[in-house]
């Protein structure tokens, strides 16, 4: 179909994941060996085989701008398994690099190692040594605590090269973004803004609002008074709630616009704060404002 | 909440119905008397009372641009009932006119009379005599055959004033629009384009396409090759089908854009054909092209 950009009619950057995390999320329908993974689709039960080479071939065919190395994501607390999965992830990352045939896609390696400092250190060293255009931090935001995640970020922050983008996978909330940037992260991805929107929740700089709440029935204010998104510039909380109550699809659309804008506005403000050498002050103020 | 225009953030014309048809659609939950209608909400079972005066007061409060007289819509084949409902609709139309307190809303009367030529004639005469800014044709598209609907339109077409807009309520398909304009109708309303979109159907100038159909899985063409809507300019049939299969809300949005555009484009072409004195030719060609 001419690749993702054409298929989606989207001419801005696209990042595709390798399938590693997606296979992990299938838990008991997968079988991992040194060469790759065999798994059953949760959609139709069909059996599929993924290897590093196959993942790269698919991503080359999709034509995304950033492609991810095929990694093995595992239970972050199982040290023995985590260690062997990490080494396999390293070998697979080398195979992914060797399998690339296009030179117009940025391949990112993925640091694994669960919640174990010495493994994260080893993994960050190894992935950095591959000298890929960007480096990702995987296997987090999968059940560990926030302090554990922050500790891991602080370790890899010391090791990953500063001149290449660092991408924290599957994160997250506005607070997570601030805590991530504070620890050197440049790129995030998460379904949260649109998933929350489909479930009637609005993200704001002081917490979430459940727009279904009866208290918004006659609230003429926008979701957020200082938000300049299309939704807040044109519609009241009462109207959004009305759309939800009457099951109008427009509710999900308007809330998605608002939630994505909220995150984009946050990263824009963080970038400006960094340029103005006042990031710590910004972060402290921003986080203090949350419910 | 400041009226519908502000609530919806919509600064173009808005037409509101009086509630007459909506009460009719509740069938056994309503009781009609000379003064008005008592009915139970199908949403929460609460009892409501509508009268011509109350309907006008609500529509004045909503602030729509075109407001409708409160009418009684009835089974189009029950002659006795239709006749008494028609006379009541006439008395209610007079009460609606008398109840208006704003002078910036166009009140339209509604012609009733089921499928009975002499009743339609009487009703068109009476409603015209009220000298309102516009006239509507109600009680059609409720179960009668197309030839019956067309016969009724031809009768009222002879009677309603030519210098005021004529509005055929609850219609409809592209073919219905052509048949309506052929018989003097200027305005239509219908949920069809968006309802079909939510059910994965695309309207085209040669019939409907069920976009869920597996045959579109690799179809790189737009829904309609000569359509200049946003959807057809940017997306393939395969992409629309993919969105439907993966239950993405965007499918309904893109199909709504396309379907509404299809009807707007049709009325634009009909207006041009009328101005060029070639409407009959246009209508014949357009209708012959349908499956």
Image (cartoon, coloured by chain):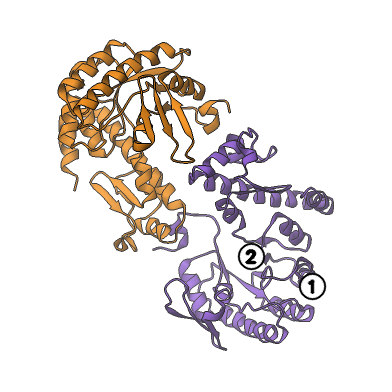
Chain colours: A purple, B orange
Q: Can residue B165 be seen by looking at this rendering? A: no
Q: Residue drawn 77% across and 70% down?
A: A148
Q: Is residue A111 above or below residue B110?
A: below
Q: Secondary structure at mark 1?
A: helix
Q: Nearer the viewer, residue B189 or B57?
A: B57
Q: Is residue B91 above or below residue B263?
A: above
Q: Assess disc 2: are there few (<14), some (14-19) or many (≥20) residues with their C-alpha within 10 Å of its C-alpha.
A: some
| Horizontal side, residue B100 vs residue A275: left or right | left
Q: Assess disc 1: are there few (<14), some (14-19) or many (≥20) residues with their C-alpha within 10 Å of its C-alpha.
A: some
Q: Residue drawn 55% across and 68% down?
A: A105
| Horizontal side, residue A143 vs residue B146: left or right | right
N-term-proximal mark, 2 vs 1: 1
Which subunit holds the residue at mark 2?
A: A
Residue for badge 1: A155
Q: x and y percent of residue B65 in the render?
A: 44, 22
Q: Say the numbered circle drawn on residue A170.
A: 2
Q: x and y percent of residue A158 in the render?
A: 80, 71
Q: Can residue A88 be seen by looking at this rendering? A: yes
Q: Is residue A154 above or below residue B256?
A: below
Q: Report the quarter where the N terminus of chain A lies.
A: bottom left
Q: Nearer the viewer, residue B146 or A227?
A: B146
Q: Residue drawn 75% across and 76% down?
A: A115
């Amino acid at each position: 179909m001419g690749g993702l950009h054409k298929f989606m009619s989207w001419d801005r950057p696209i990042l595709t994941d390798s399938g590693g995390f997606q296979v992990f999320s299938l838990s008991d329908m997968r079988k991992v060996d040194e060469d790759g993974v065999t798994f059953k689709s949760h959609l139709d039960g069909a059996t599929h085989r993924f290897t590093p080479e196959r993942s790269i071939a698919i991503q080359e065919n999709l034509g995304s701008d950033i492609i991810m190395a095929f990694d093995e994501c595992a239970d972050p607390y199982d040290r023995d398994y985590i260690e062997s999965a990490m080494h396999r992830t390293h070998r697979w990352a080398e195979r992914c690099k060797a399998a690339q045939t296009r030179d117009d896609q940025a391949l990112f390696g993925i640091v694994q190692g669960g919640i174990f400092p010495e493994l994260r250190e080893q993994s960050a060293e190894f992935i950095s040594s591959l000298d890929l255009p960007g480096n990702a931090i995987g296997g987090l935001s999968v059940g560990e605590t926030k302090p554990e995640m922050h500790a891991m970020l602080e370790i890899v922050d010391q090791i990953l090269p500063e001149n290449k983008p660092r991408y924290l996978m599957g994160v997250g909330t506005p607070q997570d973004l601030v805590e991530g940037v504070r620890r050197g992260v440049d790129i995030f991805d998460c379904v949260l803004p649109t998933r929350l929107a489909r479930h009637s929740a609005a993200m704001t700089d002081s917490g979430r609002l459940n727009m279904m709440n009866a208290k918004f029935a006659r609230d003429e204010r926008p979701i957020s008074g200082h938000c300049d998104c299309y939704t807040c510039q044109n519609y009241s909380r009462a109207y959004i709630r009305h759309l939800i109550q009457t099951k109008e699809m427009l509710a999900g659309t308007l809330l998605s616009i608002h939630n994505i804008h909220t995150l984009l506005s946050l990263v824009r403000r963080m970038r400006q704060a960094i340029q103005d050498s006042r990031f710590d002050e910004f972060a402290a103020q921003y986080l203090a404002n949350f419910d």
